[in-house]
Image: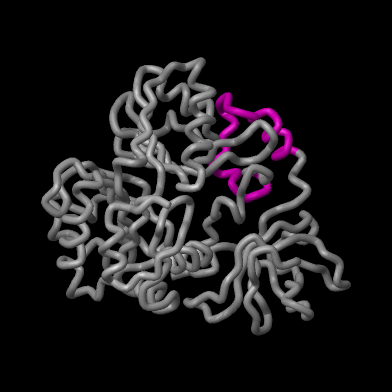
């Protein structure tokens, strides 16, 4: 198992460390619910330095990205970020990612930690045609997610940039916590606002220390991966390996909005056909009507007890105080308001299909 740069700091803070995607990662500190509510109400910091970063440069950089990703990266201005995915050739998803346009012909792709090697091999295969300059920076960079409604105010003293001017899915490169050339990105996985900070491993300890000094008056706390999961689920954000994977298409996963058929990309013809004829199953969100906690891989059943799908993500929502989840069901059961049941041990708990997000803020 690899250790992230701040491993000893997390241990000293009393974090419960667990193996995740080949790294020892802090899963929780004081408890999932308390950490979750800290992010919803004030400001919390996640160390997500296990994520992967690929630099794509050269005159064919955009052409390569256009080929391997589903979204239209030609729309990106310098300073823009874009959510996208790598479709595979079998109507599935290699990974989901964020694409940043750094300079005219320079892009940064941020991918999931568990898929770094798979993604690198996938892109490299297609790059034989385009010959863009590819660099894997994953081992050299750290990533802190400073999230919550007080994040902007709490962090403003650390930068000469006006953080209020960085709009959602935009970024700036500048000074932060005494370090130059830091990427300050108004992205995140929580739905409560804030920033993601990209820096070199050698710089992250200074940034971490100054972030907690600046946030002291705002109730800032370290947050683990367990609360990151409950926060993203309340927003209905997909988690690779649960809600999307090599066997789920972006169309059935509700990611048609990042799948642009105005360009040629991997498997675009088959996905366009699927969109036109509508997929046979859909990823839906549901809330339990009675007490219970839906879990990954629990069966979804109809009123007669017939299995119609499975739960891909589920939890007891700390913000809503009820069981929530997502899962794939036949299109017939995908309309908002449809009644389904979640099989929790020997009991089929009634649930209602709802529109996302669960948490409205």
- Above-or-below relation of 269 to 137: above
- Above-or-below relation of 315 to 271: below
Whole-percent x and y of residue 104? 30, 25
- Above-or-below relation of 211 to 2: below
Whole-percent x and y of residue 89? 66, 31
Asked whether, in this view, residue 201 is left or right of residue 351, the answer is left
Residue at 37 percent across and 78 percent down: it is 30
Q: Which residues are magenta?
A: 251-276
How many discs appear?
A: 0
Residue at 31 percent across and 67 percent down: it is 11
Q: Quadrant of residue 307?
A: bottom right
Asked whether, in this view, residue 352 is left or right of residue 137, the answer is right
Residue at 45 percent across and 63 percent down: it is 18
Q: 99 or 90: which is nearer to us?
A: 90
Q: Quadrant of residue 153?
A: bottom left
Residue at 56 percent across and 28 percent down: it is 262
């Amino acid at each position: 198992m690899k250790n992230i740069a701040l491993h000893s700091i997390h241990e000293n803070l009393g974090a419960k460390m667990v193996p995740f995607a080949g790294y020892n990662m802090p899963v929780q500190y004081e408890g999932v619910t308390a950490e979750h509510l800290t992010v919803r109400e004030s400001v919390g910091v996640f160390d997500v330095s296990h994520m992967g970063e690929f630099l794509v440069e050269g005159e064919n950089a955009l052409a390569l990205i256009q080929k391997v990703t589903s979204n239209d990266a030609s729309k990106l201005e310098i300073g823009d970020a874009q959510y996208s995915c790598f479709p595979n050739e079998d109507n599935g998803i290699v990974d989901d990612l964020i694409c940043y346009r750094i300079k005219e012909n320079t892009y940064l792709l941020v991918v999931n930690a568990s898929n770094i090697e798979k993604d690198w091999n996938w892109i490299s295969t297609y790059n034989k045609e385009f010959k863009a300059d590819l660099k894997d920076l994953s081992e050299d960079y750290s990533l802190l997610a400073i999230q919550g409604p007080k994040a902007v105010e709490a962090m403003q003293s650390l930068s000469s940039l006006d953080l209020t001017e960085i709009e959602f899915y935009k970024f700036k490169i500048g000074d932060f916590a005494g370090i130059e050339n830091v990427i300050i990105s108004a992205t995140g996985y929580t739905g409560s606002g804030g920033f993601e900070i990209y820096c070199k491993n050698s710089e992250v300890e200074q940034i971490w220390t100054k972030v907690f000094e600046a946030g002291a008056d705002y109730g800032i706390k370290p947050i683990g991966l367990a609360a990151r999961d409950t926060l993203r689920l309340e927003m209905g954000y997909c988690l690779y390996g649960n809600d999307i994977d090599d066997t789920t298409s972006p169309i059935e996963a509700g990611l048609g909005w990042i799948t642009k058929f105005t360009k040629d990309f991997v498997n675009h013809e088959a996905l366009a056909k699927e969109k036109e004829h509508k997929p046979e199953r859909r990823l839906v969100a549901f809330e339990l009507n009675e007490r219970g906690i839906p879990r990954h891989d629990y069966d979804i059943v109809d009123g007669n007890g017939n299995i119609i799908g499975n739960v891909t993500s589920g939890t007891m929502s700390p913000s809503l105080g009820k069981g929530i989840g997502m899962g794939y069901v036949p299109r017939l059961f995908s309309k908002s308001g449809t009644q389904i049941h979640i099989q929790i041990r020997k009991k089929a708990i009634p649930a209602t299909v709802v529109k996302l997000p669960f948490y409205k803020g």
